[in-house]
Image (cartoon, coloured by chain):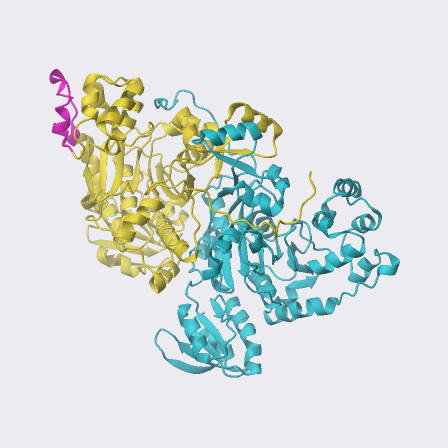
Chain colours: A cyan, B yellow
Amino acid sequence: MPPPEQPKSGAARSFQAPKGTRDFYPADLLKRRYLEKLWRDTSIRHGFEEIEGPTFEHLDLYTVKSGEGIVSEIFGVFSGKDEAELAALKESGQAPFALRPEFTPTLARMYAARAGSLPKPTKWFWQQNCYRAERPQRGRLREFGQWNVDLIGDASPDADAEIIATCVGLLASLGLTPRDARVRYNHRQVLSTLLSHLGVDDEHLPAAFVLLDRRERLSDDDLEAMAFEFGLGGGDFLAFLKRPRGRATFAQLLDYLPEGNRSTGLDLTAMLKALEAELAAAGVADWCEADFNIVRGLAYYTGMVFEVHEAGDKERAIAGGGRYDNLIETFGGPSTPAVGFGMGDVVLSLVLQDRGLLPEGKALLDRLGAPGASLRPDVFVISNGQPESDAKVKPLIAELRARGLHARHSYKATRNIGKLLQDASSASSRHAAILESAAEVTLKNLDTGTQERVAIAQVADKVGA
Amino acid sequence: MPPPEQPKSGAARSFQAPKGTRDFYPADLLKRRYLEKLWRDTSIRHGFEEIEGPTFEHLDLYTVKSGEGIVSEIFGVFSGKDEAELAALKESGQAPFALRPEFTPTLARMYAARAGSLPKPTKWFWQQNCYRAERPQRGRLREFGQWNVDLIGDASPDADAEIIATCVGLLASLGLTPRDARVRYNHRQVLSTLLSHLGVDDEHLPAAFVLLDRRERLSDDDLEAMAFEFGLGGGDFLAFLKRPRGRATFAQLLDYLPEGNRSTGLDLTAMLKALEAELAAAGVADWCEADFNIVRGLAYYTGMVFEVHEAGDKERAIAGGGRYDNLIETFGGPSTPAVGFGMGDVVLSLVLQDRGLLPEGKALLDRLGAPGASLRPDVFVISNGQPESDAKVKPLIAELRARGLHARHSYKATRNIGKLLQDASSASSRHAAILESAAEVTLKNLDTGTQERVAIAQVADKVGA
């Protein structure tokens, strides 16, 4: 160990932040904290609980999910203390750890490690920085803030819709409307059926998804070169890949299939109808539309996929996600369905800035100082078991959340009101709202035990929104 | 670019977090968020503004401050994208970037870059994770949460006391008392004078500080070996270094000086009297005591240094800091006095856990959900210029902060009340409290312009604490 030296105060130098990273002085940081506060409050209102993991992970946590290709896009990390590690690094150029480029592998690792004792579904959110060793450009930095929301252990379209509704809840809380931002969804099964009719075999599906995902940003020549590199240079797929950019209907896509092959047997209505019904129940249907161009590049999506785009399509996607039913298994856990999305701070800030939706000065200080979403649920909504009451559970929850309240319902199959009230109590909920009809609720204060009968429309006011 | 692969769902593997890092499941994370909330609220109440910088910095940002020795204790970071960088890494084993082991170099870089346009003093806090490639042990991890509070541009003992009072404000808000935690302070000039009388020359001062800082944790043999390595194996200093562990009075320390040399000319009373008076004005004197064993290992401290220790001395230091008047200059800024401290989450959690001071269940949810400190100052305290009013400014501010309010005063030299009110307005303060005497205040609502005369003791209630 060399003896410590005096700081070199004579040799003053000037230093800069690494390329693609940011210094946040107080006024800049307040704007960032504003986004983070709304991310957090939205997650809590929708019943998600926060988790956190290491900033760096073993490198193979990322390669097992995304393949070796990801190594060139992430920052390697190694300890200066470990001589053997350093020797291996000098030999191979590969570090034992990596700065997280995304959170999902950590989430899958954490879920797999405790799968047996975690509730079904498990609803987690996460909000920290991620790191990508890519060339910085508009909307993309090397260090950026990221919000992840995941619902694990529920394979139903209800869960797909709940994830999309949480994402929309954030957009609405920022002052955006369905005219400013659009949720475009698709289904991986639609795509893989089309691709198989175009002659793409299962082994080449991930590569085909990557190519389709990059269509809007690459020229025909670049796409063709990449397709050849990936072993996908052949006829029908290439024409499909190079088709005119922009939206297309499902019927237009079918035109690219070989003639004898245009009846895919896909019943799109059936595949997406349940999701559409759930999006309507959650009150977010007017934000959403099916879009068969939406692909998502990552290999691990298995069902619904979606992206949020600024309506003018001038920026990269604001958010993206989908269903990944095989991933928990890949990380050593039991086979577990899951759905989630991620949203970064960089594109979101650009979109808000353009629309004058980032508050400033005293208004910003006041909004940041306002009480956040209550970690204790404000209301736990229960149906009395009648169909007309059942139908009101999700719309009531959607309304309460839109009013800034933390509202939950039970995911248990039981219709026993006593058991459902127990569920509400163990979630530390302040109130239970038992739907007695499509119009009335028994509102019970779980701290005091008092209760009263009120109209549905009064619930939010009664619990103090 | 290799084609993307299917996720290896057949080859399920189990993964773990890297050694010395933590997975936070929801219940664990709430406890961590509790500490962070109090860190943030304390900072805001005391008038500090938050900043943030990159998670990794150019390696030489750290070596210029701490010397090459630090390289073995930090995590190297490199981009997988840059071939030239990778070649240099394989050659030298040294990465171009490092995960931040502490925040102070980033703070100094950021201050230096904008020194001309920043207010005097600049009061900044920061709260994120740091990374050390050291062997994990009780109270020390490889990734940990850290809170930094710095006051830049003020060389007075007032600033030293304000920093200590902010640290004590946090301890008190957690439910700790002066019986649980002690602030022990010293002055680097006391130490360097003693060391010079023991024959340590200026060049060896940093090494001597490191050795003295490690006395409590190392055996005599280890200390002696290190001292020889550092070129400090000689007589008087070595005996001083190996003296019995534990507290010693200044007179006892003088006994180790060569006989003809025991009159150091140091007037300890004068050196620490001004600080003690300010600690009393800030209402924290009963938490604090002079301790000539406090050294702080880092070379850059120039004046007051302090540590916070759990009263039983069973754990590592809870917090530590001091004055560093040369550091901004080292990073290319103008010569600027500064004082600050850092506190980690790991030791603090152990101390609170031991004392049953970490809330759980509903109580924890409620405390986390309670409104945080207002980013707009609640009260800006102004003196009417009379000595008896002047003397009440700091005690009133201390009382308001202890009641959970965000209270500030002006650092401007002017006594002009109009100008001071302007200062309050540009800080977006809700109220100004003008001390008219030692007992009465004119309380002015700066949003509405109304004002009233109230007793000092009523101010907190009147502004809504």
Q: Position of residue A37 (x, y in %)?
A: 47, 55
- Residue B350 shows in the view: yes
**Is A123 contained in the magenta span?**
no
**Residue A101 is at least partly visible in this image:** no
Quadrant of the rendered image containing residue A390: bottom right
The image quadrant that residue B153 belongs to is: top left
Res. A276 image quadrant: bottom right
The residue that appears at 88% across and 58% down in the rendered structure is A259
What's the residue at 58%, 58% (across, down)?
A: A340
**Viewer-closest of A199 and A351:** A199
Left or right of B45? Residue A326 is right
Residue B290, position in %: x, y? 19, 36
In the image, is B139 to the left or to the right of B55? left
**Quarter of the C terminus of chain B within the rendering:** bottom left
Q: Position of residue B68 (x, y in %)?
A: 42, 24
Left or right placement of residue B192 versus residue A188 in this view: left
Q: What quarter of the picture does the N terminus of chain B occupy?
A: top right
Q: Which residues are magenta?
A: B248-269
- Residue in front for this viewpoint, A337 or B64: A337
Q: Nearer the viewer, residue B300 or A461?
A: B300
